[in-house]
Image: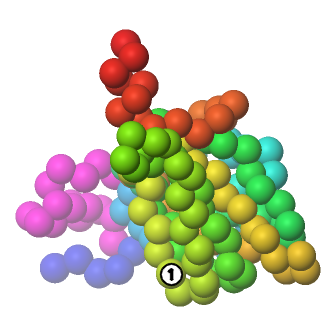
Amino acid sequence: MTTPGDHSAQQHDAFHPHLKATAPGGPLRDRLHHIRTEDVDPGTAQTEGMRRFAAISGQSVGSERLWMGQTHVAPDTASANHHHGESETAIFVVRGHPEFVFAEERDGRVEEVRLRTRPGDYIFVPPYVPHREENPDPDDEAVVVIARSTQEAIVVNLPELYVLDQLDQED
């Protein structure tokens, strides 16, 4: 039987034999990591009109399949159009009423679709889907928490929104 802090015994149990004690080039994988609000990192991929802060990433804690952080959109501001490459993105609205805009084909026409949210709502963004965030509130910043299925933030800034199927048909 091992006791907490006893690193001389085997570090992994039979339920997790595949875990390594360290991530490649990263911190130990056999402990919890605490990232305080004041320690989130603004040195992550950015899009004009918003500020992203990384909390959980391959660089910060050695995560292998997850990135998590927060995004702030100033009052009366829209981000540039962008997508997140191969990442699936989950968004939780913490503060404000941000709107998420994407293009969708309806009856042979491409239209912008606007998802209006409130605190407590969730948004799912599939890989490669072009979108933007907007904060129509003239006084208060919008804040969301983001989780991505890649260990670092992938951001591809775009000149415009488009429907993925249209792009595939043109190739």
Name the residue nearer the viewer: 163 or 106: 106
Callout 1: helix, strand or loop?
loop
Instruction: Judge whether 163 appears above or below 34 on screen.
Output: above
The magenta segment: 6-25
Residue 93: image location, x then y, percent: 59, 77
**Which residue sits furthest top?**
171
Instruction: Please identify the quarter of the rendering in which residue 94 is found.
Output: bottom right
**Which residue sits furthest right?**
139
The quadrant in which the C terminus is found is top left
Residue 76: image location, x then y, percent: 86, 67
Instruction: Please identify the quarter of the rendering in which residue 101 is found.
Output: bottom right
Residue 161: image location, x then y, percent: 59, 39
The quadrant in which the N terminus is found is bottom left
Q: The disc labelled 1 sits on which kind of residue?
A: Asp
Apparent side of residue 158 relative to residue 147 in the rendered image (left or right): right
- Judging by the rendered image, the residue that carries numbered circle 1 is 121
Q: How many marks?
A: 1
Which residue appears at 44% of the width and 55% of the height?
125
Q: Is 77 within the magenta?
A: no
Name the residue nearer the viewer: 151 or 168: 168
Which residue appears at 37% of the width and 47% of the height?
107
Apparent side of residue 113 relative to residue 87 in the rendered image (left or right): right
Which residue appears at 29% of the width and 81% of the height?
3
Tag 1: Cα neighbours inside 10 Å, few (<14), some, or many (≥20)? few
